[in-house]
Amino acid sequence: MRNTQANRLARWAAVVAGVLTIIVVGIYLRRSWQAREAEKHAPPPVPEAVERASEGYQFSKVDGTRTLFTVRASYATQFKEGERSRLLKVWITIYGKKGDRSDNIRTESCDYLPAQSRLVCSGEVQMDLQSAEDARRIVAAPSGIVTDTHGIHISTRGVTFDRNSGNASTEQPVMFSFPGGEGSATGAHYFSVEGALQMSRDIHITLTPSVPRAAAGKSTAAKSARPPIDLKGSSLEFRHDSRTMVLRGPVVARQEPHADAGHPDSAREMHAGLVTVNLDDHLHARRVTLDGSANARPELRFDAAKGNGTLTADQFVAELAPDGSVQKFSALGNAQGDYKTAAESNHVAANQVVAEMAPKTNQPRSITANGGVTIISGRGSAGRKIETASLVLDFVPGPAPKPGRRLAYRPSQVRSLTPATITWNEPVQSQGRTVQSVTRVTGQQLEAVFDEHKKIRKITAHNGTQVDRDLPSRPRQTSTSQELSVDFDAQGQWTAMDQTGNVRLMDGDRSGQAARAHAEYSTDVVTLSGAAEASDPSTRTTADTIVFNQRSDDMRADGHVLATYRKVAGTAAGNSGMGVSLNLGPEPAHITSDHLTGNSATGRALYAGHARLWQGDSTLESDEIELNRAARQLDARGNVRAVFLAVAASPTSTAGAAPSAPRVANTSTPSAPPKPELWRVRSGTLTYWDAQSKAHLDRGFTAESQRSSITGRTGDLFFAPATPGGAGSSQRLDHAIAMGNVTVKKDDARGTAERGEYDAAAGKFVLSGGNPTLYDASGNSTRGRQLTFYMADDTILVESEEGTRTLTRHRDQK
């Protein structure tokens, strides 16, 4: 019993021991497996060179209460040798002194050198220069991605970060981008305090316009409002705080024409010593400033299918719209521009040129030039030149473009804001040959209007104008007026010129004035109207209207014509002016009429319609009066009426008449010497020769004084100075000869003959030819071969075949 129980207990003990053994072995095996697994996943053993390893690293530089920057790393390993640490997944954030920035530098690993306080990041480095506001927007975004960021992104390698200053630098190639463009460089330096980024060399930037929202989702070509601008330079500085990029030269920038072939763009190339780009809040270029270097000024070059040009100045400034188009362009300081096509050349110079551009077109809407403005254009042998201190050139949209083409702007007018001069030279025909004519228009204000083909069609001047015209071998022609208007044809040739307000003309020794003047280029005819006046050294003519033909020297005057012929000292009579220099008196000769036609070259002048001439004591009226300078001749035709003062009769005229003739005594008391008589002459025509002081009457004439008269078919009047030998005194009728059916009357006496002669100084009539007969009031007659009738004492000297006898009629009762 006891043995059985003992055996039973022994068996249970063995079982328990086996179970315990199995449990112990199992636990051992399990722990061995766990140890192997733990060893398998455990970090490698710390090398002997490593002093300490940690899972995080952070360093911040603080200025007072402001954190300037923070350096973070996910892992940090400190090495014993070399006193360096390896930082993994490095993130550096720079806040700036004001805390308004959140610039980030990110890389996978950097070596930290405590002795030099530097982080050396040899791998790829990403830099983001952005504002604190942008950083907050990115954090707040649901996906952590913001598409419209306003920062600059930089990719490079081999960056060194200075932990003391917060500055970073690299000498490796750099790629950068920002909303307004992208670029590349070699070497970069980042300054944390200033928030500035400097790129050392090999700069290449592409400025691209922003994409309008309406173009979102479209093709790249459709999105691009303007072609990009490519810039190349030697170094670049980006100033984050002021949003400024400074590109140092030599700088070359180029913009290709728009892809649309119908767009009026041209390729543009710029050369400068310094380019400053001011960026907006979205980092799009809003202002570009170009400055020169010590050796060269900035220059813009334009190259299009129709022509090419250059523009230089001390400085260029371009204000840009977000779409990349130019809103305003300024050339400051001694601006000089040239543009040439196959047909013409243009040059502009000014101290300052400012162009206001039409939206989104890169085409000027207006250009303002100030300071010594000169614009010169030439086409063949013709040219234009504008000079002023200030002007504005306005542009308007051109004709509606064809489908697929863009609207082009054209110049509409140019306006001077200060006194200006427009000069044009052109080939003209003069005296059968082609010569260059130079015309200058000056005004207090000038305007030039262009047509749709960019040709000048009208020039106007205001508030005081002057026109000068020069032709070879001719005196300068000058005209002044208050207002001026010049019209041009489609070929740029002026066609008509109008001047108003106190118009005055000068052409050598000839001049004119009027209220208005109109000139035609094709005919070279000038018309003066409104109190018109024309003068030369010997003649002055006024009329309602005066017309000159400057090619043929013809002249016409209409309405209230008044001409004055002056005597010019030292000038031979009849050798100057239009018409003959008359010598009927010492005073100027005056002629009035309704119309005048003449020629200053030939010296002929015809006064028609109520023509009237007076000089000294003599007057002449007729339907028309013609003067001939070459012949020194005057012709009066139609209803001629003249008044001449006769030479005073001599008191001894009777005694000297026939000294051998017997005389009948006259016991009457002699009267006082007669005064000069005024003779009135009527005839069909009258011709006067100034050199001979002689006038010929034709088509019947009558000459009568207060006491006597003489008539005939034709007659001749002879004049002599009023004072014998007195040069320059008034011419008076000395004697007259009548021919054909001559009749002489004195009081109640009448004489007839074929020829009659009147002698003013002798106071006698001489009848001859035919059957000379003298009748008295009683019907008695006296006949003879020649009858001489003395008016002073009514003595008649009769010459006949029987001899000569003297008769005395009763004396006139005074």
Image (cartoon, rainbow, N blue to C red):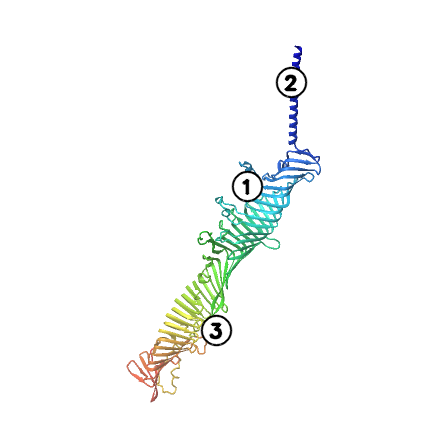
- Amino acid type of disc 2? Val
- Amino acid type of disc 1? Thr
- Amino acid type of disc 3? Thr
| Identity of the residue furthest to the bottom in this view | 802
Pick the quarter of the image with the C terminus. Answer: bottom left
Q: Distance between the residues labelled 1 and 2?
A: 78 Å
In the image, residue 732 lies at what x, y percent? 41, 76
> Does the residue at mark 2 contact the one at mark 3 (Cβ under 8 Å)?
no
Relative height, residue 140 to residue 179 (above, below) = above
Marks 1, 2: nearer the viewer: 2
Q: How far apart are marks 3 and 1 (CA)?
A: 93 Å
| Residue under numbered circle 1 | 149
| Front in this rendered view, residue 142 or 392 | 142
Relative height, residue 271 to residue 155 (above, below) = below
Relative height, residue 790 to residue 443 (above, below) = below
Marks 2, 3: nearer the viewer: 2
Q: Residue 445 carries which label?
A: none
Res 302 seen here = yes
In the image, residue 168 lies at what x, y percent? 64, 42
In the image, residue 669 lies at what x, y percent? 36, 80
| Residue under numbered circle 2 | 15
| Residue under numbered circle 3 | 571
Pick the quarter of the image with the N terminus. Answer: top right
Which secondary structure lies at badge 1?
loop
| Residue at 38% across, 85% down | 658
